[in-house]
């Protein structure tokens, strides 16, 4: 089954990120932020995403332009899906503070997602309680159905 092969590839690919530190604007395995991780991760699956919108990404970018990330997510060539219909490889995005979408990750399976955290570096989290409440949607690039 295609989904099982993809999950195995996801698990193998995630091994590359286990010791990668969080670095604001990081775009290499020497350090990644959440956008850098998503861009780098998807490249392993032949999916090319932009790593910026051409403007400087300041640490508090979301204060000056709270719609910046969702505006750019909506430009991606994917299918919007509900947070209740998640599958492996879906890009998930979250509102962390004051309902501003400022964080993203990649679904590892239907219950967990991988992302970069300023406190924890690379991490896999369960899509439950706090994360499910903060999740504002997902984009699907590959469908298994």
Image: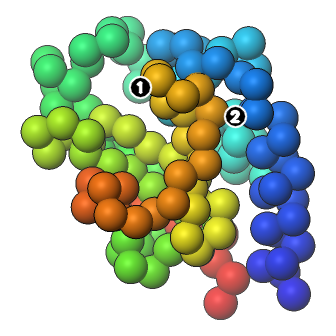
Q: Residue at x 57, y 19 (%)?
A: 22
Is there any visible trace of residue 74 in the rendered image?
no
Position of 30 relative to 125 (above/below): above
Q: How is the image coloured?
A: rainbow
Query: How far across and how far down the image is residue 59, in percent?
Result: 33, 12
Query: Which of the two labelled residues, at mark 1 and mark 2, occupies the earlier sequence position?
Result: 2
Is 64 left or right of 107, judged from the image as shown? left
Q: CA distance from mark 1 to mark 2?
A: 16 Å
Residue that numbered label 2 is attached to: 40
Secondary structure under the numbered disc 1 in the rendered image: loop
Mark 2 surroundings within 10 Å by alpha-carbon count, few (fewer than 14), some (14 through 19), many (20 or more): many
Mark 1 surroundings within 10 Å by alpha-carbon count, few (fewer than 14), some (14 through 19), many (20 or more): few
Is 25 left or right of 133, judged from the image as shown? right
Query: How far across and how far down the image is residue 141, in percent?
Result: 60, 64
* Viewer-proximal residue among 76 and 24: 24
Query: Which quarter of the figure has residue 87?
Result: bottom right
Is 71 left or right of 116, judged from the image as shown? left
Query: Which quarter of the figure has residue 136?
Result: bottom left
* Viewer-proximal residue among 44 and 4: 4
Query: How far across and how far down the image is residue 103, in percent?
Result: 38, 39
Q: Residue at x 25, y 45 (%)?
A: 95
Position of 3 relative to 76 (above/below): below
Quadrant the C terminus occupies = bottom right
Quadrant the N terminus occupies = bottom right
Secondary structure under the numbered disc 2 in the rendered image: helix
Position of 5 relative to 141 (above/below): below
Q: Residue at x 14, y 21 (%)?
A: 63
Query: Which quarter of the figure has residue 62?
Result: top left
Is 74 left or right of 46, judged from the image as shown? left
Residue that numbered label 1 is attached to: 53
């Amino acid at each position: 089954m295609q989904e099982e092969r993809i999950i195995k590839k996801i698990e193998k690919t995630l091994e590359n990120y286990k010791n990668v530190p969080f670095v604001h604007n990081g775009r290499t395995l020497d350090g990644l932020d959440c956008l850098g991780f998503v861009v780098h991760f998807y490249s392993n699956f032949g999916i090319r995403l932009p790593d910026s919108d051409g403007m400087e990404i300041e640490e508090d970018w979301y204060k000056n332009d709270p719609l910046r990330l969702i505006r750019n997510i909506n430009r991606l060539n994917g299918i919007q899906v509900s947070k209740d219909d998640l599958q492996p490889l879906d890009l998930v995005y979250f509102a962390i503070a004051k309902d501003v979408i400022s964080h993203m990750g990649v679904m590892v399976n239907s219950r967990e997602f991988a992302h970069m955290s300023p406190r924890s570096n690379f991490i896999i989290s369960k899509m439950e309680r706090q994360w499910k409440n903060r999740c504002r949607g997902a984009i699907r690039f590959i469908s298994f159905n």
